Image: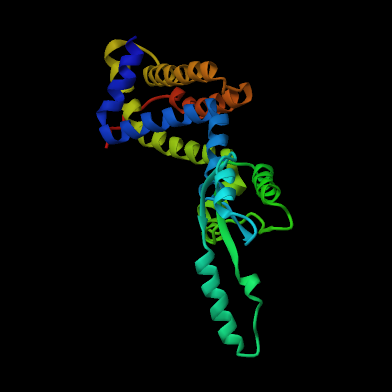
Amino acid sequence: MFYLTEFFKSLGESLIRGFFFFLFTCLLAFGFTHRAWITDTLSKLTPDKMVNPYFVAVVDSSVTSTKVKAIVAKLPGVLSITEETKKNKSKLNVLLSQLGEGYSIDSELLNFKSLKIVLKPTLSPESLQFVRDQVVKIAGREQITATDVKYPEVTNVMKAHPFYVFIEKAGDWGVLGILALCWVISFWLCYDIFRSRGYIIEKFQRRKLVAAKSLATGLAGVIGLFVAMGILNGTLRILDLMALVMIVSVFWTFSMQFWKWKPTI
């Protein structure tokens, strides 16, 4: 109990450095004991999962669009259905006017209904295609034409962003690598605090390796807490735990060296 108390007293010597060291220790322990959760979260952060895919169905005049909309709305994964007939007709009329008087289209071809069907981004590509096929099947292949499932143009812009490029290439291990780097920096910034307090206690209380034992007790307590959470949540993996222990133990060994007085900054 003495060394655990000393661990938190050392963190309190510098509230800012101590706070970030404790924070990144918790984040590092959480990341390695809940890597499956991080993987699942990153899969939901992809641009394709953050925007709503859609497709456009063009229905001829023989089909009642209201009936089609009522049936399609019941399909799984459909968020909304909007009719864009007027807007598409106006675009077509502008195009005809630009082509000149010599171009004309049969009035029956202009009497169509255009439905924009927006889907949930959480659906798999197979599910998206299934909904599109069902829409065509409902209205009849001779009375309806549907585009392929598309994503808003912003998706391509998002995919080119360095953040999403990094997530796509590095994945969960990239996130864990950043957490590990932040933990190492925060550990090094708190290194002198534990060293100075340990030196004083060793001189006046005849204890040995106070800093090493304080760090070991505090870090083991934090890791043990998140290991228990990982077991309860079913996300703990032995290899991930071994990697976590290896990272922490490698830098903890610095506290085993011979101590000399160095005042804290």
Q: Where is residue 198 in the image (x, y as percent from the top left)?
A: 33, 21
The residue lying toward the viewer, choosing from 72 and 198, is: 72
Residue 174 appears in the picture as rendered: no
On the rendered structure, is 24 left or right of 89? left
Q: Position of residue 263 (x, y in %)?
A: 27, 32
Q: Position of residue 144 (x, y in %)?
A: 68, 57
On the rendered structure, is 231 left or right of 219? right
Residue, far bottom: 101
Q: Where is residue 44 in the image (x, y as percent from the top left)?
A: 54, 41
261 shown above or below 7:
below
Q: Which residue is drawn at 58% across and 56% down?
A: 151
Q: Which colour scheme is used?
A: rainbow
Q: Which residue is drawn at 57% across and 40% down?
A: 74
41 shown above or below 32:
below
Instruction: Say which quarter of the image contains residue 134.
Output: top right
Residue 36 appears in the picture as rendered: yes
113 shown above or below 216:
below
On the rendered structure, is 137 left or right of 45? right
